[in-house]
Amino acid sequence: MLSILIPIHNFDVRAFVKDLSALTVTLTQPAEIICLDDKSSVHFRALNASVSSLENVVYEESEVNLGRSAVRNVMANMAQYENLIFLDCDGKVVRDDYLSKYAAIRQYDVVYGGRVYQEDRPVEADLHFHWYCGMAREEIPVDIRVNAPYKSFMTNNFMVKKSVFEAIRMDEEVKGYGHEDTLFAMNLKRKGYSISHIDNPIEHIGIEAVDVFLEKSLNAVTNLAQLMASDQVDESIKLVKFYRKLERLRLAPAAATAIMLFEKPIMRSLKSAAPNLLWFDLWKLSKLHRAVNATR
């Protein structure tokens, strides 16, 4: 029995939910799809309200913006079944056996299915960097993910036992975009829950303009600095590991200053047809130094 939980914020989910609804009908066990709008604009609420007419779908709207973590906690409380599938709203079903593959799993704590992107480069040049970065950093084959199960976890497409989720829950102190999945995985690890990985991806179609994506990346760096300050993350995260090494060598301030001297060419590279992800990592490193100092 599956509870499929989709928090919505300013995205058209009609096609996604329609496809999922059709898949629930093919299952041999009960399933529900709960869509909770997290205070989207009037435009998107008007579009998405129509999914309530689909089979096995419940659509509700929050009167306030709960945020990425809190909305998932609320939705877990709404679910009536033990097997919770959390999905981001900007997804697309790519396989007909998507739900049946999750439904067949019996023994687990958490299962992550993966993420894919469209094969072709977006026509709009402004979307290229997000797509390129996602393809390189997030579209990870299952045979690689299994080697680092906690590090490879993301919240866009996972199944969790309700009892496990209630024992961990999403940390609502993590605000805005970024690293709520990192903290959730770290808390699972600390409490001895396992993360299994399977090949059952959802396509990420919510590709954003480069400036929007960079702003969200900056927010993620700020969140990471706060988690570092409270010792909630370790050096299994590459950016944390490299920054801590620079700190031990007392080179972090100099490195951050040197990197920022090249911020303009870095931005030109990231907005070009052939972005350099090493420059992106260095840019995040410099921003992390600033954010770490702000927490002290």
Image (spheres, helix red, strand yellow):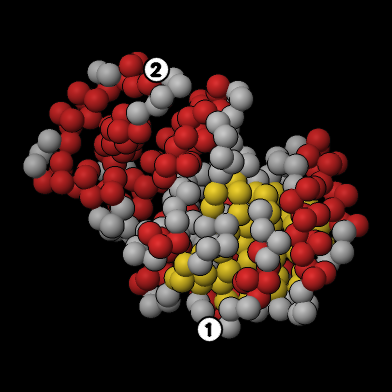
Per the image, the residue denoted by label 2 is 268
Quarter of the image containing the N terminus? bottom right
Using the rendered image of the protein, determine whether residue 5 is visible from the camera's viewpoint: no
Judge whether 20 appears above or below 11 on screen. below
x and y percentages locating residue 91 in the rendered image: 65, 49
What SS does tag 1 mark?
Answer: loop
Query: Relative to the observer, which residue lies in front, 147 or 161?
Result: 147
Look at label 2 and name its amino acid: Arg
Query: Is 252 placed above or below 142 here?
Result: above
Q: Which of the two discs, 1 and 2, labels the residue nearer the N terminus?
A: 1
Q: Is residue 241 left or right of residue 226?
A: left
Q: Quadrant of the C terminus?
A: top left
Write down the quadrant of residue 127 in the picture: top right
Q: Are marks 1 and 2 in contact (CB under 8 Å)?
A: no
Task: Judge whether 257 appears above or below 73 on screen.
Answer: above
Q: Residue at x 65, y 75 (%)?
A: 103
Count neighbours of disc 1 (C-alpha within 10 A) and say few if under 14, some if 14 to 19, many if 20 or more. Answer: few
Q: Quadrant of residue 157?
A: bottom right
Query: Measuring 63% from the left and 71% from the top, which residue is drawn there?
Result: 101
**Which of the pair 214/42 is nearer the observer?**
214
Q: Nearer the viewer, residue 169 or 198?
A: 198
- Identify residue for label 1: 107
Q: Locate residue 99, reporting x and y percent.
A: 68, 67
The image shows a total of numbered marks equal to: 2
